Image (spheres, rainbow, N blue to C red):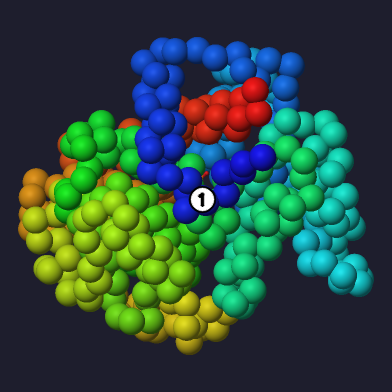
Amino acid sequence: MKDFITTADWKQNELQQMINRANEFKSGASSDVLKSKSVALLFFNPSLRTRTSFELGVWQMSGHAIVLEPGKSAWPLEFELGTKMDGIAEEHVIEAARVLSRYCDIIAIRSFPKFEDWKIDRQDQMIKAFAKYASVPVINMETITHPCQELAHMQAIQEKIGKPQKKKYLLTWTYHPKPLNTAVANSSLLISTKFGMDVTLLCPNESYLLDQRYLDIAKENIEQYGGSFNITHDIEEGYENADIVYAKSWGALPYFGQWDQEKPIRDQYQHFIVDDDKMSLTNNGLFSHCLPLRRNIKATDSVMDSASCFAIDEAENRLYVQKAIMENLITQDL
Ligand code: CP
């Protein structure tokens, strides 16, 4: 049984098939593949797009979505094995995953890092525990990667510029007053390199490099699928002739959990904001962001309101790609 936890587990052509199916959904195709089926949506963290698009997508495919918020409307969960549960968790994932598998046909999880120790958070323990103990497919709604966002992003890129191969793609760090998850940045590298783009990662300095695991996968993808992968800390070099600019803010991994030490460093880089001057260096480049976005902090009003910004199209595509993912997983054994 296959899960949808990271696109690293899926080949380019398999992901392309899901994007093609998402295009069909966008053009009006219907599916009742979830008829008499239910999908558990577990949100450990807040959401606007993910919750709305998953609930709607399940309903549009004649299924029923059950939203659970562990620690709020559902019991707080423990995921460590062999631990003495003398903290706040009332239930272990072992039982939660097994019980939900008796009721539901898919389990989807949003579980962000705890932002205390990256060595622990990078293990992605919560979703891996669900995948281990569930007997139904598990979907990642954002943990340390955000694969549903990746597919929506790639669907939108293909809509805007056609074949992505060899197109110049910039992932730029941008400022935010708080340290944010690296998930979307990791995902940006995974999907852009998987589709053979000429990818540049622009970040303020070495402390803002992403986890080596994702840099390594990016390089492996380039070897397998073509394209190139380059890292720079020079803003002009990063933006030069870019066809796609994707922005995201994230906390520096060496300071993980010691955010008071990172803040004065991060605050020096507020000029990484995406603005018209930087976009003018591109090849009439297009801009996107996964959202939510703080205007005039991460990107200016002018960039967000420009015709080159496709963040809303990308957000819309979440609905279609997630329907394609659920359809793929629910029919895999038929
Ligand atoms: N991009 C995204 O996942 O949005 P939400 O956090 O609102 O779900």
Q: Is residue 332 left or right of residue 323?
A: right
Image quadrant for the N terminus? top right
Q: Which residue is mark 1?
A: 9
Residue 157 shows in the view: yes
Look at the picture and state if 309 lies above or below 84. above
Query: Vertically, is 244 above or below 107?
Result: below
- Residue at image point 77% right, 45% down: 134
Q: Quadrant of the C terminus?
A: top right
Frontmost residue, 76 versus 324: 324
Q: Which element carries disc 1, helix, strand or loop?
A: helix
Does the Cβ of the disc 1 residue fall within 8 Å of ligand 1?
no
Q: Residue at x 57, y 49 (%)?
A: 5
- Camera-side residue: 127 or 269? 127
Residue 310, horizontal then vertical, whole percent: 27, 39
Q: Residue 266 sits in which quadrant?
A: bottom left
Establish if 41 lies above or below 277. above
